[in-house]
Image (cartoon, rainbow, N blue to C red):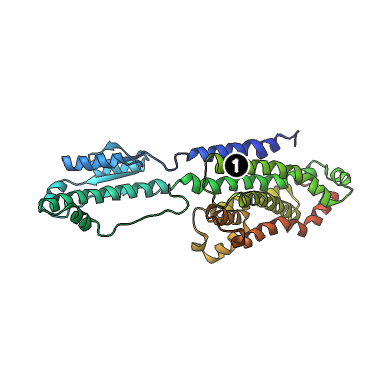
Amino acid sequence: MCKNPIYGFCMVIFPVLVIAFFTTLMNEGQPVEMPVGVVDQDNTPTTRALIRKLDGFQSSHVVAHYPNMNDARQAVQRSEIYAFLLIPKGTTDELLSKQQPKISFYYSSVALLAGNMLFKDLKTISTLGSAAFGSAQLSAVGKTESEIRTFLQPIVVDLHMVGNPWANYNIYLSTAMVPGILMLFIFLITPYSIGTELKFKRSREWMRMADNNIHVAIAGKMLPQTLIFLIIFYGYEIYIYHFLDFPHPGGVVPILLLGLLSVLSCQGFGIFVFGLMPSLRMAMSVCSLWSVVSFSACGATYPVFAMNPMIEALAQLFPLRHYYMIYQMNIFNGFPLTESWLHVGALLLFFALPILTIWNIKKAMLVYVYIP
């Protein structure tokens, strides 16, 4: 490990860079000042006031005015803006004459998060515009402020976001993406460290040092890696829960247990895969594929229960899926560990998988000849 720089980069340097990158990428919590365009063909004090209100929203920033819809649409296609508001000529006159003018807003969902947030802002500004005119008309006929409020908004929504009231996307994504990438490094380094013994013809010497006991050989090789990965994993958890103050009502015990189970389950799966196919190239390819697919199947960005039933069943074969379930149940929502015993058992099962193939590893180390 000291002589080969791959270990230092993949076990310490790259994981630390990944942690720093993802947690600082969304340190604002939500994207702010996203570029928006306006096509104001009416150009009255009323429409200009609406545009100023749109520019005042935290997520939106009006960066350009366009003479027509085609220019605005091309700006969206060039990714200069994410959305634009179209106010046709005569909007103010139609409002004052109690007609129903139509204003339109267009947004791009190529960037899904930006599109959804700007849709909310544009819909809000449209509602505010109609409410302002309605309020002025009702006030002119002598209605009180309470009556106006009741007429314009008969039902008031009392919204409570449980666990993450700030809608902080750093809390949502960094707690799933960063552990997934750390698991990817564990998936890759585990078969690499075993396979290089065979590749560089050190396998028989390795087995001789362990008195041909494959359990001692594997334990001796994995233990230093386990300690280093645990330090990185626990350092990441201390950083997000203590310094960044991510919500964790479940307490310290689930955090420590989840870190340990995550490292051991990934190492167990890596050993199992190498024992299944004692080839450095094939084992690393399978582990890489398994870890990358787990980002889509863990349920952090799209709920697993809404997927095809076959995909929902296959999702249980990925350690990251069980990591995410334990995190959201026991750490984020504070339920007792007994509620997630099935997922804890699944991670322990991944850790125990090498029992099925460890003797094949011994045979490969003593008999096989490496084939590039």
Q: Is residue 273 above or below residue 114?
A: below
Question: Which residue was labeled with disc 1?
Answer: 238
The C terminus: image quadrant: top right
Q: Where is residue 290? Give x, y as percent.
A: 62, 53
Judging depth in this view, the residue of 166 and 79 nearest the camera is: 166
Left or right of 200? Residue 160 is: left
Q: Is residue 155 above or below residue 103?
A: below
Q: Is residue 43 visible?
A: no
Judging depth in this view, the residue of 163 and 57 nearest the camera is: 163
Q: Residue at x 35, y 43 (%)?
A: 82
Q: Residue furthest bottom?
A: 309
Left or right of 132? Residue 76 is: right
Left or right of 139? Residue 311 is: right
Q: Is residue 305 visible?
A: yes
Q: Residue at x 57, y 40 (%)?
A: 239
Q: Where is residue 60? Give x, y as percent.
A: 33, 41
Q: Residue at x 70, y 41 (%)?
A: 228
Judging depth in this view, the residue of 63 and 277 nearest the camera is: 63
Query: How many numbered badges does the structure rendering display?
Result: 1
Dot 1 falls on a residue whose secondary structure is: helix
The N terminus: image quadrant: top right
Left or right of 306? Residue 344 is: right
- Residue 357: quarter of image: bottom right
Q: Where is residue 168? Give x, y as percent.
A: 45, 46
Judging depth in this view, the residue of 38 and 126 nearest the camera is: 126
Q: Where is residue 257? Give x, y as percent.
A: 65, 51
> Which three-letter amino acid code belongs to the residue tagged 1?
Ile
Determine crowd level at label 1: few under 14, some 14-19, many 20+ residues with C-alpha closer than 10 A.
some
